[in-house]
Image (spheres, grey):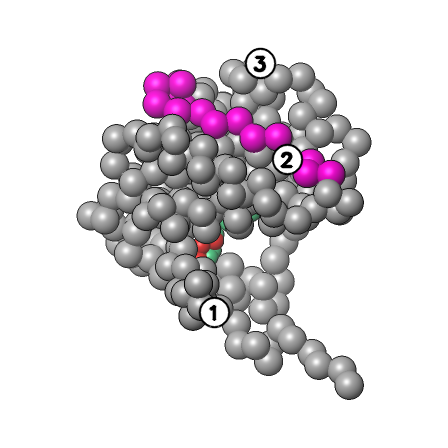
């Protein structure tokens, strides 16, 4: 593999928010997971616990989370109370504009935006979702390890020609997820990942994001 091949793979990955219902072969999912296992982690502790939820089980879980969203406030294990400001707010708005623009949802269309958000809780109709947990006692340092695992998994799925999207939204109702998966409170839900075959005709999949310039994020010393 050349550096250009790797760059092409990384740039080929993008968030997919509309899927065909047909399942991915379990050997293909296992191969992507087996690749992701090679992500680095602090002291090689590999603190990721991954649950793959598929088919009807995912639809049932999605329906339970959607119902919860209609009836109360989310209680994620990791609070999502950071207000993005300055350049971070600008980037957040940029990604929202790309998505809602692609979907034809106007800025003042609150009902449309709400419906678009709720699609998150059904994993955008994907046939599979990975729920990534961090065992109790671990904190921010080890949560960063999960970031490496998640990106490696997303790239492995991309290399298989599959679509995927990381979803903080799938971690908004961790008690419901734990109840459905038979897990105790010791498993902290950090993020979910919807994946499967992309539905290229879904308008959400026309959204494209950009990136900051190198000079905006890198400072050289010496
Ligand atoms: C940890 C994490 C959580 C995310 N949560 C969501 C989410 O809940 N819903 C969603 O539609 N996209 C979510 N995304 C996708 C980002 O919006 C997306 O990666 C970003 O806008 C860049 O676009 P790209 O993935 O197409 O390159 C998340 C991404 C990451 C890494």
Q: Residue furthest bottom?
A: 222
Q: Is disc 3's CB within 8 Å of ligand 1?
A: no
The disc placed on residue 48 is 2
Please check the rendered image and state whether residue 46 is part of the magenta-colored stretch, yes or no.
yes
Structural distance between the alpha carbons of marks 1 and 2: 28 Å
Magenta-span inclusion, residue 23: no
Say whether disc 3 or disc 1 marks the residue closer to the N-terminus.
1
What secondary structure is found at the residue carrying circle 3? loop
Over which residues does the magenta segment extend? 45-60
The quadrant of the picture occupied by the N terminus is bottom left
Q: Quadrant of the C terminus?
A: bottom right
Q: Earlier in the sequence, mark 1 or mark 2?
A: 1
Q: Quadrant of residue 21?
A: top left
Query: How packed is label 1: few (under 14 Cα within 10 Å), some, or many (20 or more)?
Result: few
Q: Secondary structure at mark 1?
A: helix
In the picture of the structure, the residue carrying the numbered disc 3 is 182
Mark 2 is surrounded, within 10 Å at the Cα level, by few (under 14), some (14 to 19) or many (20 or more) other residues, namely: many
In the displayed structure, would residue 33 be above or below residue 185? below
Q: Is residue 192 left or right of residue 205?
A: right
**Badge 3: few (under 14), some or many (20 or more) residues near its Cα, within 10 Å?**
few
Give the number of marks.
Answer: 3
> To which quarter of the image does residue 197 belong?
top left
List x then y, in percent, for residue 69: 48, 28
Q: Position of residue 138 (x, y in %)?
A: 76, 36
Mark 2, secondary structure of its residue: loop
**Residue behind mark 1:** 3
Residue located farthest toward the front when viewing the structure as drawn: 1
């Amino acid at each position: 593999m050349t550096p250009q091949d790797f760059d092409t793979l990384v740039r080929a990955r993008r968030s997919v928010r509309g899927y065909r219902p047909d399942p991915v072969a379990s050997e293909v999912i296992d191969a992507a997971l087996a690749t992701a296992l090679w992500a680095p982690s602090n002291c090689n502790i590999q603190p990721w616990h991954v649950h793959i939820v598929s088919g009807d089980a995912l639809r049932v879980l999605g329906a339970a989370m959607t119902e919860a969203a209609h009836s109360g406030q989310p209680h994620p294990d990791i609070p999502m109370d950071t207000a993005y400001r300055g350049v971070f707010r600008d980037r957040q708005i940029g990604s929202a504009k790309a998505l809602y623009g692609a979907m034809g949802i106007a800025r003042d269309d609150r009902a449309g935006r709400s419906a678009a958000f709720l699609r998150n809780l059904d994993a955008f109709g994907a046939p599979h979702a990975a729920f990534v947990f961090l065992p109790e006692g671990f904190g921010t340092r080890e949560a960063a390890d999960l970031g490496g695992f998640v990106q490696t998994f997303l790239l492995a799925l991309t290399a298989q020609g599959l679509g995927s999207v990381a979803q903080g939204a799938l971690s908004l109702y961790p008690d419901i997820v734990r109840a459905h998966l038979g897990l105790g409170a010791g498993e902290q839900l950090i993020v979910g990942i919807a994946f499967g075959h992309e539905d290229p005709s879904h308008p959400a999949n026309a959204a494209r994001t950009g990136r900051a310039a190198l000079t905006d994020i890198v400072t050289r010393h010496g």
